[in-house]
Amino acid sequence: MEIQMDPQYKQILDDVFDAFTMLSSGGFVSLMHVEGGFTRYSRAAVELFGLPGEYIPNGAMDWNDYLHPEDRRRYMDVMIPLLEGKTQTYDITYRVHIKSGEYVNFRAVGAVLRGSDGKPSLIGGAMYNQGRTENIDPVTVLPNRNTYLEDLSRRIAAGQSSVSLQIGISRFSEINQLHGYTYGNRILQEIAWLLQDTVKDKAIVYRTDGAAFILLFDDISRDQAAAIYDHIRYCLQRGIEINGIRTVLSSNGGLISSYSTEVDANTVWSCMNYAYEESKQRRHGELVDFNGSINYEGTRFLEIINAIRSSILMGCKGFHMEYQPVIASPSEHMNGAEATVCWEDPRYGRVAASDFLPVLERDFIFEELVDFILRQSLSDGVRLLEKDPNFLLCVNAYRIQLEADYFIDNLVYFLEETGFPPHLLSLKISSDCRWIDPDRMRHIIQTLHAKQILIIIDDFGSGSDSIGFLKNAPVDAVCVAESFIRGIEESARDRDILEHLTRMASTCVPHINVKGVDSVSLRDILRQFPVTTMQGRYYSAPLTYEQLVEKYYSSWLIPHQRGRRRIPAASLPFLSMMFRRTLRIHTRRFPPEYGPPAPRCGTAQLFRVRCRRSTAGCASSLHSALHNLPVTCPPYCRPGQSPSGHDGYADQRAK
């Protein structure tokens, strides 16, 4: 495409484009000059997508037309704030229609360069093909992640077993900040040589994102791979010397073995990343073996994760939402429910969210799943509001969501789409969100508060930074970690710790939630502390929407939020007969001069209503219930006397 553009703008565009190309490491670079009115694409992108040319006037081509229809809204939600100058960077995954006619997953990352007036001048970045990019890492000259996935896929297809060991360096960014990127690249090269010298011809060494490497073994046991990791870790702890400067390095490691042909390479990658993050975040660098650190048999669990990933890509097929009631203390009324996702399959059965969410949280398809969770839970919440106008819905928010620039926009979109009121929504922030920059986290919470959305800290008390997070973040409630609940029935010391923790939290937030309440004795102990709501199997296991409605709203035995009792019309003749029979038995057995025989009268026994008045005195309660009216017991009357002052026993005897 032949175009005419200002030479000055073209020179700026080309210079910045060349810089982006050097930093993209094989990505497809695009750069928009907002003021100049042109966008430049890399030649490889022109060939792959079938674009009109490298230089395209802004407005002559709509990139949105190349995206999958389901990804276009999300793309616009990211680009509009960029063009308006409200955001500085972007990181989004979408599907792009390529020249051959298929859709391919791409990850686009980039930033805004502002002019002297503070407005966006250049918007540029790189798109990385999730299926294939350049195969060689330019710094270490090692094959990269994409080559690893290709090699692993070939081995899986051939039915060959393999062992993958991921090794990474902790806090490597501090080395770059202290000594510069050139020194950091020299460190990476030395690590690459160390790994190759250690494994020799036993494994292939790959470099992945950041300061992480993968060793792919053919025929080796997990114990032998663990011994190799221990040796490499020892060498890194001794330090690497460059230009007279010795740098001591701390490593993390994740190990996974794959034997099944029903598991694809991306699933192995996600599970290995999970083991690596466990080593980094919770094990202080100790090697974590994925196959030995889960509740399922290793190979079968890989197959389950693979099936779950496929279900997500098929529109979250097999997923459904469940809700665990949140009970107010001490009134025992249901205030709301916490939403959680569950996956079910005829072959693998039911798999709880706690088993697969931590593994998929760093997978690129996780965004699709959390969108499903938000949309479905809010839709169910709208239906529940028809039965209880004060129903509070709690939804979990994950670190990857909060770090995304478009999270709040997405949330607002789902609220508007479903019509769920924001002031009845609470977001429960997971424990790993504490790793987000404090200033950014504070800004996110303030923005959500401005939209009347409530914030809850999950797993409060766990981790050394839990108290600091409460201090710095203006949250509305905390959910005490279950580790503080275990053992309080037997240990006075544990009860004292929990009491001090809850009383301290109550000075900062108005609401304290406790999960894991599984017995009446545990409930009674927690009532002694400033706990406002409880959850647990003592009250109810997680329920589907239909089960929740059936248990708490469709039965006449269950009180409404407003204290109303609802009875199906078909049951009225039978209930009326039962009431007359019960009333006759009670009044004959206990004449009025002896007073009520028990704390509950006949009506209360029949309807399980908390009433301590006389049998005859509650006749109007039954009358109101049978006519679908609010249950309002009459003022206190003497035993055996009706509200009108007549003797109930005499009235019944006359009949």
Image (tube, helix red, strand yellow):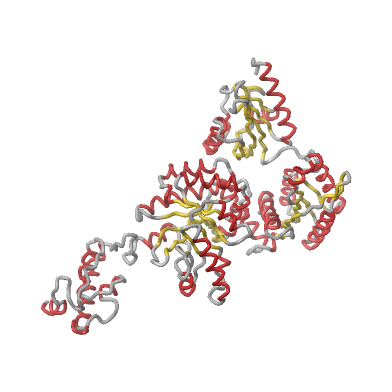
Question: Is residue 638 left or right of 299 when viewed as pictured?
Answer: left
Placement of 381 over or under 563, stated as above or below: above
The C terminus - image quarter: bottom left
Q: Position of residue 412 (x, y in %)?
A: 47, 42
Placement of 38 over or under 100, stated as above or below: above
Name the residue nearer the viewer: 15 or 474. Answer: 474
Question: Residue at image x 55%, y 51%?
Answer: 473
**In this view, which residue lies farthest toward the right?**
244
Q: Position of residue 612 (x, y in %)?
A: 28, 74
Name the residue nearer the viewer: 572 or 231. Answer: 231
Question: Is residue 207 left or right of 309 when viewed as pictured?
Answer: right
Q: Position of residue 291 (x, y in %)?
A: 69, 61
Question: Residue at image x 60%, y 21%?
Answer: 37
Question: Residue at image x 67%, y 24%?
Answer: 54
Question: Residue at image x 57%, y 69%?
Answer: 497
Q: Position of residue 235 (x, y in %)?
A: 84, 55
Name the residue nearer the viewer: 113 or 319. Answer: 113
